[in-house]
Amino acid sequence: MSEDHTPAEPPVAELANATLHDGGSTVMRAQFSQRVPIRSILCRPDGGAGLAGQKVTVGGWVKTGREQGKGTFAFLELNDGSCPANLQVIVDSSVADLGPLVPTGTCVSVSGELKTPPEGTKQKIELRVDKVIELGPVDPAKYPLPKTRLTLEFLRDFVHLRPRTNTISAVARIRNALAYATHTFFQQHGFLYIHTPIITTSDCEGAGEMFQVTTLISEVEKVEKELKENPPPSEADIEAAKLVVQEKGEAVKKLKSEKASKEVISAAVAVLNKAKEDLSKLEERAKLQPGLPKKDGKIDYSRDFFARQAFLTVSGQLQVESFACALSSVYTFGPTFRAEHSHTSRHLAEFWMVEPEIAFADLEDDMNCAEAYVKFLCQWLLDNCYDDMEFMAKNFDKGAIDRLKMVASTPFVRITYSEAVDVLKQVTDKKFENKVEWGIDLASEHERYLTEVKYKKPVIVYNYPKGIKAFYMKLNDDGKTVAAMDVLVPKVGELIGGSQREERYDVIQKRILDMGLPLEPYEWYLDLRRYGTVKHSGFGLGFERMILFATGIDNIRDVIPFPRYPGRADL
Amino acid sequence: MSEDHTPAEPPVAELANATLHDGGSTVMRAQFSQRVPIRSILCRPDGGAGLAGQKVTVGGWVKTGREQGKGTFAFLELNDGSCPANLQVIVDSSVADLGPLVPTGTCVSVSGELKTPPEGTKQKIELRVDKVIELGPVDPAKYPLPKTRLTLEFLRDFVHLRPRTNTISAVARIRNALAYATHTFFQQHGFLYIHTPIITTSDCEGAGEMFQVTTLISEVEKVEKELKENPPPSEADIEAAKLVVQEKGEAVKKLKSEKASKEVISAAVAVLNKAKEDLSKLEERAKLQPGLPKKDGKIDYSRDFFARQAFLTVSGQLQVESFACALSSVYTFGPTFRAEHSHTSRHLAEFWMVEPEIAFADLEDDMNCAEAYVKFLCQWLLDNCYDDMEFMAKNFDKGAIDRLKMVASTPFVRITYSEAVDVLKQVTDKKFENKVEWGIDLASEHERYLTEVKYKKPVIVYNYPKGIKAFYMKLNDDGKTVAAMDVLVPKVGELIGGSQREERYDVIQKRILDMGLPLEPYEWYLDLRRYGTVKHSGFGLGFERMILFATGIDNIRDVIPFPRYPGRADL
């Protein structure tokens, strides 16, 4: 197959051949891009050696460039994002002006021949360029990301350029792999992917921590601008206009009583109508008020876009339950939001959650699913992102690969909350900041002790006190605990939270009332129990937490492409 | 393999066997759910016949139930959402009370033996129940979705129950299939899935059509509530407090001048400090204002969560370009939002978009990618959702399957905008409402004429007049057109819109200014051209439009789980 760009028939039939792990002696062109991905050259078992002699076009950004041999040729380390490795590219000064090629960040598209490098070099293959096809230059004096090592914190001020760095691009590939692994896992098990709503009117618990979605403010701004440019009529203006209407009305009456001609009367009526119209316009404008629309002293949400108050979702669980109670095995994978003023390295205002929901499933099924899913993700990274994981292990967390292997192969410990409390109470080798006793919510220090120190493997804690958990969790027969479970893993602590849902109408209704919540917003949710109720269970995995766990990166702001947190929402 | 629920070791090792298309003589249990999916019984090549004699547990919702043989047994048509087909279930009155089993909507979990039905029945297999394990009853007098045929419009008032209907569940399975097909297509081609932000501060064109994301209103409500409960101090209150401070200050002075004892002075100083504190609290409270916070007559967004005005995204394109300009082939698939007051059957306030972006790719590559992607989706549905497509063809759109086959196998027509205008000008068999001349934006009637009447296949129109397209589209050498393209398909018209992006710094800067847009918000976008710029292209596919195209459903509100439109955002 030629590497030339020859747009022809759409390549559907070739899809089956499109894998980049082809180990033959020809290279595979990217199908909708005028290049051979560097991955398809370097990420073969032979490191590309078998491709010597092939003519290829590659494109990418220069990681490091240097002129050598007194300016007779240049070495470029070229990266196109398809893999962490760079292709070594050699350009002769007879082929192109070398100066503009070498600055870090320069984009080039070049063609040439793959050659076996001289013995003793670490590369298995390199590219000898015969043509520079395209060049996107960089002024090194101005480029914000010089070759020097930059901190992740510094890079957060350049979210649009940081994907060009080794770390952020490796994280992007790992994130991509985990997303596709997520879909693949659930699809293989017959789960249907459901898009739960982003804008919601039904999460009514902690409105304080929710973002509001509205068009009211832009309406306010429009009205206030209009009122500024064109002040509203005063009462005197309106009185004057009313007088005019009265006057004109009397004139008409007079003409009629005087039996004036039709033409004269209709002319006077026209004048009257105009006066009435002017008045009603003034009255309409007089109603324009600056500020948010009010009714009975409260904001009048009937005038908002959805005719009621609307928020960004904090979880798709409640809504996806309506699909589980019809299609049995479903999941959602989407963005969720919290308007918390948290400045920690573990919180974002916008983050992604994976939430499966399974009918005819109890807490044990739920734990089995959570464990199988996490293991699948770990094995997937080992199978598909080993080079990126090596980069992470080398630069961020020596134990990252071993941790994936351990989690993929070790049965998770499963203990009840009561057992966990007993274990923690007996700890003598560590002093906790938060006191442990039955009934408390386990703090991060407790969770990490269990998974990192005590068991040194993933731990599922289940059957929590009902007082610290949500109303929708199934009340156990003991009347004290609910069928909830948390999956704790080394490095991040809680990775998953889930539960069997309360499917008994009477019990859940009582739980809502006991918690002091109003019933009305939950009527639809109660309907799922009222009509054809079913035992069901589910959980939520914080997707960024999984990436922190996998990569060993410390700050959650560095594992999402565009982090949102108090005071910051760049781009 | 037993169908009993025996929670044991997590089933990672069995993943490879988990496909439901197993054609052997044993049934496959769902792995995290105490049932055999009905799909794995009925959707085998033999319709389940080969499973006769197997003991299984199934769960689902009764579509139709009837008592027969003078109440000695009941027939249930059971559906669990795993496929459109129902399993015929027979329950003897010796096994359970039949009355509660038969109402439509009842949930049951039952075990029994699969048997070959009597000859002459259309079923290939049926289930003879020996135990009713669980029952979620329904009061037929109250159930909102009786067995009678319900309109899709009626069902929109019951978004939490409508997944139990044949149509909405078939749409959910088709939607799921298209989503996974989307990921599979792009992953197979080496594209990385990028999560672009939902909350954005950078789409600055049509703020009027964007939803605002804010915590300001909840702050306003908090302050106004507080002011109501506890009215702010009047000026007189503050004056009085100031007087007290003055008085107490003088008292201290006096004591000092009188050389009073240390104890007496410090007691007086304490009184003074208390008075000062009271005053400053009053002054603080006096600053509390009802209404939105203002600065220089404008809303003070520095006090909003992100310290600036923030919106819901209308497209991830601009942001994903920053990843294409680093990782080469990327795509996004996420929710997007428009605050348009459209009440049409083609618009939603919240909808999903697929947006690939490819470096080193021109408009022709872009068209090749769009065509291959749409063909792949169509073929995927034919391969994976044929039973659901048959349901759609039977109930909504006779031509739905043929349309998929045609699109999957026919090369798309490609014509320039100028050619399209020429074609439309020569139309005599139809009168358009909108006049056709070079420079207009093609209306839906024009687009549908081209794809449905003139060519009867998908059409890609490219090279549009620059005046009707966005600033970021690449200016062609003619100076009049831009390298934009739209994919038009029968049934919905425009399915995809895309373009080669303007990668030349000077040209795009001029385009922004020419369109009267401010440069500042686009500086980051200009950076992508300033540093290592690259030829790149991309497009956006409206995911719900694709589902309308595939299913033949008319109203977009019926192809998304939770539709949002003016005045409505249920759940």
Image (cartoon, coloured by chain):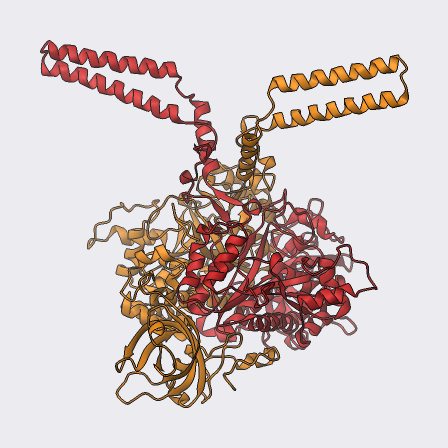
Chain colours: A orange, B red
**Residue toward you, B367 or A395:** B367
Q: Residue A391 at what x, y percent from top left?
A: 32, 71
Q: Is residue A83 above or below residue A533?
A: below
Q: Quadrant of residue B527?
A: bottom left
Q: Is residue A560 above or below residue B414?
A: above
**Residue toward you, B192 or B364:** B364
Q: Residue B461 at what x, y percent from top left?
A: 66, 67
A571 relative position to B414: left or right: left
Decide if residue B251 is in sight here: yes
Q: Is residue A143 above or below residue B234?
A: below
Q: Quadrant of residue B226?
A: top left
Q: Residue A442 at what x, y percent from top left?
A: 33, 49
Q: Residue A127 at what x, y percent from top left?
A: 38, 83
Q: How many marks?
A: 0
Residue for point 27% across, 13% down: B244
A201 relative position to A84: left or right: right
**Residue toward you, B214 or A274:** A274
**Residue toward you, A177 or B340:** B340
Q: Quadrant of residue B46?
A: bottom right
Decide if residue B85 is in sight here: no
